[in-house]
Structures are given as structure tokens and as C-alpha cells.
Image: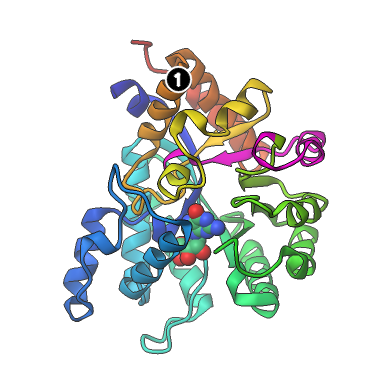
Amino acid sequence: DLFYRQLPKVELHAHLNGSVSFSTIQKLMDRKPHLNIQHNMTAIRNGQKRTLDECFQVFKVIHQLVDTEEDILMVSKDVIREFADDGVKYLELRSTPREEKNSGMTKRSYIHTIMEAIRQCKNEGLDIEVRFLVAVDRRNGVEVAMETVKLAEEFMLATDGLVVGLDLSGDPTVSHGRDLLPALQKAKNCGLKLSLHLSEVPSQGEESELLLNIPPDRIGHGTFLHPEVGGSQSLVDQVRKNNIPLELCLTSNVKGQTVASYSEHHFLYWYQMEHPSVICTDDKGVFCTDLSQEYHLAASAFSLTQEDMWGHSFKAIDCIFAPDSIKQHLRQRWLELRPALF
Ligand code: 5GP
């Protein structure tokens, strides 16, 4: 729909390797025909659903396709360009640094290459501000988490504000957040903003309570925080007391089957409470969506007007991790770019 495409948007929850489009996957498959990977192994089409566990298998396939610095550069530039084409004016990308013995890629060169992609896109004049969150995959344990925080801090200091924070993601059924607290605390103390996947699956309440005490600067998903779905009022109170925005990804949750249907998505719970939330894509490649479509789907599911969605997109600026000067600049641009209502 033209309105949602023209609407200036902020994207705050996008995993790099989950955001790789069909056409970029094709270029990667052409580079590595011996892997014998098919498109149906890297994306979940409309109407299809998978268990969350199966979703994590998909990332493993994509990681096989993206295993050199050259791949990372191409993937990052393509993803940034696609978000810009969709009307995203401010993007926070996140990715888990990986080393690949075969290609000589190190975790440091992985992040360095993404920084290079961001700079190249800027030099090419793309109309999008991009920042980066270094991701901790909870599967990899305490030592790797600490090492990743150190890398994130190093890049935050060296890149003049391109690295703004740390993400905690990965299979929520693996490991316990309790063990990761020291690493997350360290990140917070050195000035990295924290975006943590919380209560993405049921019965993570105890972990969420611990992690909310840090407190994080944003929450990924938070699907099972509220009492109606087995969370609790005290978790909701913790979120509200600290005014922590939620990053909400409708199609991802429906296709990953943690939410039964669009109209049952917890977007409505937080929206009715006027608690800050931001509609995001999560993995636009894997879930075959884009941010305009997610805005449109939310509007349809909850009978919101274009005016409401304009308000949602404008308020999303409050939730970005870049400093106030950037927020002010974006608010100015939003007013200039405001599309006519249809
Ligand atoms: P990457 O970090 O390699 O750029 O992007 C893929 C990774 O992001 C996955 O391996 C996983 O750790 C994380 N990820 C992507 N989507 C989700 C999600 O919906 N939930 C969680 N918990 N992690 C995700």
C-alpha cells in the first residue's frame, strides 16, 4: 500500500542474517552451488508456519551461505538498500559476530566489514541513517558473551557512534539469562544500550524478572510478559515503571507460532495502555515481509487509521539508541516527509 511505503519509518529490530532478501540469497547460492541450498530452506512463505526451533534451523542454513567478509559486505549493503527503498529513514541493524576458520573471517573483521558497508551506503548517498547493535547469542555461553561485550565496547569507542548497543538473542530455550547478567551489566556500565529478547516463549518469567532489574533500554518481543498469557502483573509493572519500549514483530511471531493470529498479537495490549512500542520486522528475509507491510498488517488487525500509524511511526523516534541530536533531526524530517492521508 502506497501510504505505508511513503510513511517515513524507523526499524529497530532487524537481525542481519534474517533480513537477507530472496535476490541476495540467489546471489549467494550462485557463489556456492556446492552447498545445494534451495530457497525453501532460507525463507518461510506466506501461509506457512514453523516452530520456533525450525526457525532457528533456517538461520543455520543462511549462515552457511554467508561465511566470508565479501558475503557480509554484500549482504549488509543489500539489506540497508532494501530498508531505504521501503522508506526506512533510521535503521538499527544487529548481528552476531562469527568467525569462520575456512575463510579467515574473524569476529573483529565481521563487525569491521559491517561498519564498512554502513559507510559505503552513506557515501553512495542513501537516504537512511544506520546504527549497529552487536548481538550476543545466548547459546554460546558466558565466556563468549563477555568477549562479545568487549568487542562491542571497542567498536563503540572506535566508530564514532555507529555501534550504539548490545542485543541478547538466540534460541530462548537454551541457557539461562542469570548466567549472562555480569556480561550485560558490564555492557550497560560502559555505555552500550541494551536491547534484550525477553519472554519470547512461555515460562521465562523468572529470567525476565532478573533481566528487567538491570534494566534494559528496550525489550525484544516480550510476548509472554503480561498476565493474560501466563506472565504477571509484576513483570508488566517493572516494564512500565522504567518505561521500557517494546520491539514488536507481528509476522515473525505469527509464523514462528508464539502468537496464534495477527489480531491476537500483544501489540494491542501495550497500545491500549499507551506504553511505547515500535513495530519492526525481525527477519524480513526469513519471514518474507517488509516494514511497510508490518505497519499495514497492524493497522488492519487492530482497525487503526493512517493517522494512528503516522503517530506510531513518529513516536518510534523516541525509542532509538542514537543521541538526542539525531532524534531532533529525524522529527524535523518526519514533518517534511509526512505523506498525504488517503
Ligand atoms: P545474525 O545475528 O546472524 O545476523 O542473525 C541471525 C541470528 O539472529 C539468529 O541466529 C538468532 O541468534 C538471532 N535471531 C533472529 N531472529 C530471532 C528471533 O526471532 N528470536 C531470537 N531469540 N533470536 C533471533
Point 67% across, 34% down: residue: 228
Q: Is residue 197 above or below residue 1?
A: below
Q: Quadrant of the N terminus?
A: top left
Point 69% across, 54% down: residue: 204
Q: Nearer the viewer, residue 189 or 158?
A: 189
Name the amino acid type tagged 1: Glu
Residue tagged 1? 336
Residue 327: quadrant of the picture: top right
Image coords of residue 198 (percent x, y): 65, 51
Left of 313 or right of it: where is 151?
right
Image coords of residue 24 (percent x, y): 25, 59
Q: Quadrant of the C terminus?
A: top left
Helix, strand or loop at label 1? It is helix
Q: Nearer the viewer, residue 297 or 306?
A: 297
Q: Is residue 137 above or below residue 14?
A: below
Residue 151: quadrant of the picture: bottom right
Q: Nearer the viewer, residue 45 or 84?
A: 45
Q: Is residue 95 among the parts visible in the rendering?
A: no
Q: Is residue 16 among the parts visible in the rendering?
A: yes
Q: Number of marks in the image? A: 1
Left of 115 or right of it: where is 173?
right
The boundaries of the magenta stretch are 228-251
Point 39% across, 29% down: residue: 297
Q: Is residue 53 above or below residue 45?
A: below
